[in-house]
Amino acid sequence: MKTIALSMSILTALSINATVQADDEPQTRIKNMGGKCLDVSGSDRGKNGAKVHIWACNQASSQQWWLDQAGRIHNQNGKCLDVNGPDLNKNAGKVQLWDCNDAPNQQWRFDKRLRLHNAGGKCLDIHGPELHKNGGKVQIWDCNDAPNQQWKKESDIAKANTRPEPSAFIAAGQTSALRIPAKNTTQAESHTTKPITPRTTPSSSLENSFAQSQQRTAQVQQQSQTNQPVIKNAPAPFSGMIKMHNEWRAKVGVKPLTWSDTVAKSAQAWADELKTQYNCRLKHNPKRQYGENLGGGSGRLTSDLIVGLWAAESTDYDYASNRCTTGKYCTHYTQMVWRKSTEMGCGEARCDHATVWVCNYNPMGNYMGQKPY
């Protein structure tokens, strides 16, 4: 009974902490039809409440953004494009930077007309006469067909005549470049009021989910061929990690991953950063060049537990539609079995109260429009 209680405690912590999505898009500038780029004053780009404007496009980090599969637009300083709480549904609502969170105030999506919608039904907009001006005001407004509301990711523009640019990663029930989660029943209040309550899952459900994933893993192990390549250079405790990845890949007919010391070095560096700078809270590496899965929780965690939880998402992935079940995550699993990923490397770090695991994948996976296998 004591062992079961401990397992349930660990799983609950993982449920709360391991809601981090799989890989996001590469960094890019976001350009308007007036030839200006979305920008933040250099000294303010790490501040909550910082004003967002447009400026002549340049190589400054203040114009580098990337889009995650939860529909948020990040900058290099760990802030996200945000609408001031009470202004979510208002014309001329203030657009600013704020600590990234799950509030609808930070959820955006592109449509076919190149507009960026927010969760309040408004679109990212430039004040009319300022479309071509440095310092032009960025706001939200009723969606329309004016050039003031048309935006393009520069990565799409640059590659339009070469090959299709993967515009987003697999997300639940969404085909546009950004996802607004289907479940938006709770409206976030102003940033100065009460914080957002984290989503939790009952321990019994988690225990059942993990038990099911353990059972499926055992089935995969029985089905895997006995002559599957052995990865000899993966150090403990990561040999078990890569072994389980390859068992799941074998089930869907994908070649095994090999261990890369270079990729592992990157993963370990970020795990160490999460320990020293974030007290083992899960946060994606904003400068990563590889795919990334994160996991963490209280106590000393094993590779079986971490991979088991990622792999349990397989039941929430529908191959026919290439989507996650609405309201569920499956992108940890799809990155695990992504056919074009050929190498992996992992890192681990421990804080007083928790352990964090980072696995990186080369090349990265989870591109919209491509199936994992």
Image: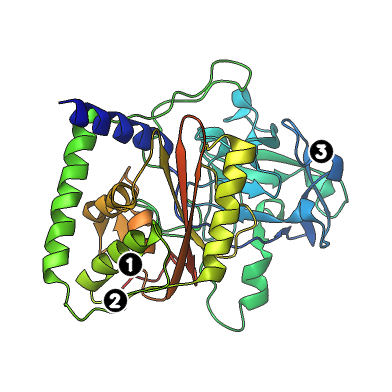
Determine the secondary structure under disc 2. loop
- Residue 332 vertical placement versus 226 (above, below): above
In depth, the one of 88 and 244 nearer the eye is 244
Where does the image place residue 29, in percent across and percent down from the top left? Answer: 71, 60
- Residue behind mark 2: 254
Q: Is residue 87 above or below residue 172?
A: above
Quadrant hosting residue 277 = top right
Residue 87 seen: yes
Residue 286 image point, x, y percent: 63, 52
Q: Which residue is tagged 3?
A: 44
Residue 184, position as x, y percentages in the image: 41, 33
Q: Are marks 2 and 1 in contact (CB under 8 Å)?
A: yes
Q: Quadrant of residue 197?
A: top left
Against 91, residue 191 (above or below) is above
Q: Quadrant of the image for the N terminus?
A: top left
- Residue 295 sits above or below residue 2 on the image: below
Q: For mark 1, what is the residue?
A: 337
Which labelled disc corresponds to residue 277? none
Task: Please name the amino acid that badge 2 sits on.
Answer: Val
Q: Is residue 325 left or right of residue 170?
A: left
In the picture, which quadrant includes the C terminus? bottom left
Q: Pick whichever of labels 2 and 3 is earlier in the sequence.
A: 3
Of callouts 3 and 1, the N-terminal one = 3
* Nearer to us in this view, 56 or 44: 44
Left or right: where 86 falls relative to 337: right
In the image, taking residue 289 as reference, residue 30 lies left or right, namely right
8, 152: nearer the viewer: 8
Q: CA distance from mark 2 to mark 1?
A: 7 Å
Mark nearer the viewer, 2 or 3: 2
Instruction: State the residue lying farthest toward the right.
Output: 134
Disc tally is 3
